[in-house]
Image (tube, helix red, strand yellow):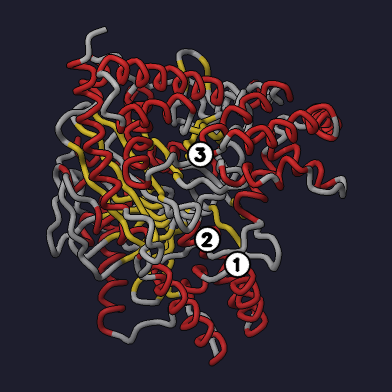
Amino acid sequence: MENQLTKSNEERTFQYQHSLPSLPVPSLEESLKKYLESVKPFANEEEYKKTEEIVHKFQSGIGKKLHQKLLERAKGKRNWLEEWWLNVAYLDVRIPSQLNVNFAGPAPHFEHYWPPKEGTQLERGSIILWHNLNYWQLLRKEKLPVHKVGNTPLDMNQFRMLFSTCKVPGITRDSIMNYFSTESEGRSPNHIVVLCRGRAFVFDVIHEGCLITPPELLRQLMYIRKKCHSEPDGPGIAALTSEERTRWAKAREYLIGLDPENLTLLEKVQSSLLVYSMEDSSPHVTPEDYSEITAAVLIGDPAIRWGDKSYNLISFSNGVFGCNCDHAPFDAMVMVNVCYYVDEKIFQNEGRWKGSEKVRDIPLPEELIFTVDEKVLNDINQAKAQYLREASDLQIAAFAFTSFGKKLTKKKMLHPDTFIQLALQLAYYRLHGHPGCCYETAMTRYFYHGRTETVRSCTVEAVRWCQSMQDPSTTLHERQQKMLQAFAKHNKMMKDCSAGKGFDRHLLGLSLIAKEEGLPVPELFTDPLFTKSGGGGNFVLSTSLIGYLRVQGVVVPMVHNGYGFFYHIRDDRFVVACSAWKSCPETDAEKLVQLIFCAFHDMIQLMNTAHL
């Protein structure tokens, strides 16, 4: 990625979109075979036999018909999954999405030129905003290099959704509004929204055809902060976005009915490039301990986050930054890319602005003043109360493991991602005494509008290895052999899933075809083992590698008795962020992280001491 961001390149960002292959439909036989294998760790002999019968019946009966219908659907669409996935995974979901669906993460600038320091919030904020706006201009001009694996271009469509994108709540289904255009396509919004102490302000970032500079951005931010710190707080309309989706949709309809001007103001927020959130708090952070900052970006003040916005850039009083993003329009790799770009620019410029200090006479920010009444204020208070209640139940442990990193695992010929996934399996097994069904993200961007597929990291091989690690009668050599088998299995699954040969999205497609045809739910999907193995979004471990850069993130668990687990990998360290619900007596994020770090040591020791 480093090379791809700095290389001067004549290719245009979106030029390969029309030539990308369509998303394939895997073979039914292969998918069901892989599915059966994935349920084994969670079944006794009797349960497995029953599921095997259900699967075979499905394969020769209704499954065959559904698969045919899916193949027909795929003929007419370049990505048969896209619309379905968006609806099922995001837009139809009714629980509050700001906390349950959004992902968030701290910016890594504190590790070099920007350690936490009071009094730096606005100056640093103007610089970080400016670099983000330059990234926006790269996208507008299609100068962001195309991501490739070797010479194969990957789908870049998600990058269109980074700026000027917002989810809008609906009574039964939300929708996504995207106002972004490239320069060749025409005009695109060029204003940002700043939220501070329950108030909202807007200003354009282009003046007389040019991007406004950090000193000019600083003037705008100073104006807003001074106003907000010397006058009463605003109503905090943004808090409504943290509500249950149908409730928020109704509150929004009421707001618009109260005064049509409210709709104009809402559309200003929706179409803005991004929302810049000005926090008053100063979360603690060090290069070894990210827990407090990670919690602050995920569960901070709901009155200064627009939960539906694709990009909330959050600034704290001590000059530390982060982001909070709606997950519907794009996956975390988009955010990782922009964060890395900005971090590199800040690093290259030693954290300073080295250009002109001249400030042109640009219009001051305009405040978005919503018409509210008692009902709206009650809705806001209710939204805040439910949000803070749920947020206070979340435990987050985010730490760096610094004994070694990618360099050593590569030297031992162990894939670093698989290394972490297996350490997680072992840690979970040691903590809970049984295997944990696990979702790991695989990207499918080789295909048109491809997003993700599920790698089920809890394999038969992984469980056998975990059991051998807990069995004192097993020799080191046996443990090592079992570990290498688990590695090989995981590496193959990741390769298959990225190549469009996963099975979870395929099974989802088959269940949705049945639903669309008005057919009863096939037994495959009502089988207890389907849910127990993670099917239907019931994975106890919800995990994702965020990449090999300095960028970290976090999500909440998929299920109440589960964990959210994001991690990134560097030459000399692994950084992990683990979340769990405090109200679940079984789970403990901090304990799990400690056990993962122990597992790292055990695995390396195994490679050092066992003789092949």
Task: Give the quarter of the figure containing the C terminus.
Answer: top left
Mark nearer the N terminus (1 vs 3): 3
The total number of labels drawn is 3
The residue labelled by disc 1 is 245
Q: Nearer the viewer, residue 269 or 137?
A: 269
Whether residue 412 can be seen here:
yes
User: As displayed, is residue 602 above or below residue 476?
Assistant: below
Counting residues from the N terminus, which is met first, the one under dot 1 or under dot 2? 2
Q: Is residue 88 left or right of residue 242?
A: right
Q: Is residue 369 above or below residue 391?
A: below
Q: Is residue 519 left or right of residue 481?
A: right
- Residue drawn 29% across the image and 51% down it: 106
- Residue 557 horizontal side relative to residue 6, left or right: right
Are the residues tagged 1 and 2 within 8 Å (C-beta)? yes
Hey, which quadrant is residue 207 in on the image?
bottom left
Task: Return the residue found at the far bottom.
Answer: 374
Q: CA distance from mark 2 to mark 3?
A: 21 Å
Q: Residue at x 62, y 65 (%)?
A: 169
Q: Amino acid at mark 2?
A: Ser
Residue farthest toward the front in the current orientation of the protein: 473
Measured as percent of width and height from the top left, residue 50 is found at 70, 36
Can you say which quadrant of the picture contains the N terminus?
Answer: top left
Residue 385 spot, x, y in % from top left: 44, 79
Pointer 3 residue: 159
Q: Is residue 405 above or below residue 215?
A: above
For the residues carrying marks 2 and 3, which lies nearer the camera in this image?
Answer: 2
The circle on residue 88 is none
- Classify mark 2: helix, strand or loop: helix
Residue 97's disc number? 2
**Where does residue 82 sit, x and y in percent of width and height?**
67, 39
